[in-house]
């Protein structure tokens, strides 16, 4: 299973967590031959899996992400009955990580999947 270091997310709720930081370090290293900026970027193991899923459509990483999320939730043991997914930031993205990870996670945990509870305004 992929290593992760949970991070508490503060807000107007009882408790929230992210599995880890996405990016550990990113440093501008110049421009490529087409004038695009280039970076030396180091991601957390979970961040790398998410990057591969979101940017390279690498569906083979979904199982590892679900396993990590399940392990964390089972160790945390929150008193919850439902998973409410956050709407996608990019609705045009071919793969939607929240849906691909969250829905099977809710099934594994025996929790309701409330995909219509939060929507983005038009």
Image: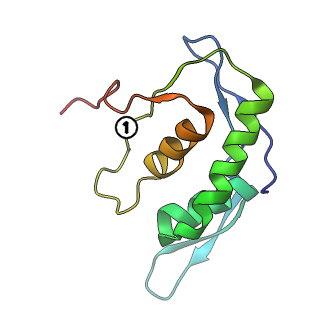
- Residue at horizontal 31 percent and vertical 29 percent from the top: 116
- Residue at horizontal 53 percent and vertical 39 percent from the top: 107
- Residue at horizontal 68 percent and vertical 58 percent from the top: 64
**Residue nearer the viewer, 7 or 114:** 114
Please give the residue where the numbered disc 1 appears in the rendered image. 87
With 88 as the anchor, is 54 left or right in this view?
A: right
Q: Indicate the position of residue 50 as horizontal and vertical percent values.
A: 59, 57
> Is residue 3 depicted above or below 55 in this figure?
above
**Residue nearer the viewer, 115 or 28:** 115
Q: Indicate the position of residue 117 as horizontal and vertical percent values.
A: 34, 24
Color scheme of the displayed model: rainbow
Q: Indicate the position of residue 16 as horizontal and vertical percent values.
A: 64, 23
Please state, as top left, top right, bottom left or bottom right, where the C terminus lies in the image.
top left
- Residue at horizontal 30 percent and vertical 50 percent from the top: 91
Q: Indicate the position of residue 85 as horizontal and vertical percent values.
A: 45, 34
Q: Residues within 10 Å of mark 1 (few under 14, many from 20)?
A: some
Element class at badge 1: loop
Q: Quadrant of residue 94?
A: bottom left
Please state, as top left, top right, bottom left or bottom right, where the N terminus lies in the image.
bottom right
With 6 as the anchor, is 105 left or right in this view?
A: left
Counting every numbered tag in the picture gives 1
> Is residue 37 depicted above or below 73 in this figure?
below
Name the residue furthest left.
Answer: 122
Q: Quadrant of residue 81?
A: top right
**Residue nearer the viewer, 65 or 31:** 65
């Amino acid at each position: 299973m992929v290593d992760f270091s949970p991070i508490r997310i503060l807000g107007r709720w009882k408790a929230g967590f992210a599995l880890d930081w996405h990016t550990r370090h990113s440093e501008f290293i110049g421009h490529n031959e087409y004038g695009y900026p280039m970076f030396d970027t180091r991601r957390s193991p979970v961040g790398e899996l998410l990057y591969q899923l979101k940017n390279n459509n690498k569906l083979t990483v979904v199982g590892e992400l679900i396993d990590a999320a399940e392990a964390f939730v089972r160790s945390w043991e929150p008193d919850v009955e439902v998973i409410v997914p956050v709407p996608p930031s990019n609705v045009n993205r071919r793969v939607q990580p929240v849906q691909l990870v969250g829905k099977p996670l809710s099934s594994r945990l025996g929790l309701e999947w409330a995909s219509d509870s939060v929507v983005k305004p038009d």
